[in-house]
Amino acid sequence: MAYDYIETVRDDAVLTIRMNRPDALNALIPPMLEELIEALHRAENENGPSVLIIEGAGRAFSSGVDLKVLSGAKPKAGRVGSVFDEPASRLMQAVRASSKPVIAKVHGACFTGALEFALHCDFIHTTTDTKFGDTHAKFAIRPTWGMSQTLVDAVGLRRAKEISYSARTFTGQDAFDWGLANACHADKDALDEAVASLAKDIAANDPATVAAYKTLHAIAETHDVPAGIAAEGAKEFPEITDTLNRIGGFLRVVK
């Protein structure tokens, strides 16, 4: 499918979805959000890809919401309005509902709406010099895409308060040190290599079992540990069918 604001690249079981407005640092606009949703839905309904990578073309992952679009809007009570919030809500739901692991490959810049997007992904890998920030308060915009919840989960309440209340910029190294990022790499080349390796490792495993883990980890995010343990034992995953084949293959190798 042809897109105007994103690109998709398939490499075996790994699908890369690339935001493609490099001249605008991949600033988010409603048509781009719609295309990201479409790409995620297509990936979910295809049998081939088992791992998804979200990245940005050019110098940055994304600078966040395109403020030029907002300049003609009429925000009310700090909301940017349904023109952004409605597709953004569906995008975040599509990421979280995906049965396939989603890796945010973040370089250059990742601000506000883009940070919210990345936080909904399963993994965040970045570089030491990437700039992050939550600038909602700077522009008198209230969070509506999940920042108040996902950032707290990632870095803890006190750190999240400092990030959001101050609107300060922080680095990829900070993101890793605070638990927001899974890994921080020396430069873009190292980031590309590490994410490709991670995606390959995940893709080598049974996709149905990985999907089952995602379902169970979603329960863990509710912080109801007893419910999560009960669900882990009680929930059935009939789509996991490759157990004996994989065990047999391993045993044949170690004989």
Image: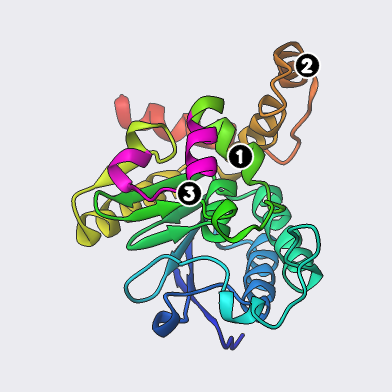
Question: Which class describes the residues within 10 Å of circle 2: few (<14), some (14-19), or many (20+)?
Answer: few
Q: Is residue 21 left or right of residue 47?
A: left
Segment colored magenta: 159-175
Number of the front mark, 2 or 1: 1
Residue that label 1 marks: 150
- Report how far apart the C-alphas of labels 3 and 2 lie in the structure: 36 Å
Q: Is residue 251 magenta?
A: no
Depth order, front residue of 164/224: 164
Question: At 56% from the left edge and 27% from the top edge, which residue is drawn?
Answer: 157
- What SS does tag 2 mark? helix
The quadrant holding residue 24 is bottom left
Which quadrant does the N terminus fall into? bottom right
Of label 3 and label 2, which has the lower sequence position?
3
Tag 1–tag 3 contact (CB < 8 Å): no
- The disc placed on residue 227 is 2
Number of the front mark, 1 or 3: 3
Residue that label 3 marks: 167
Amino acid found under the numbered disc labelled 2: Ala
Depth order, front residue of 208/245: 208
Q: Percent from the top left, x then y, of residue 31?
A: 67, 81
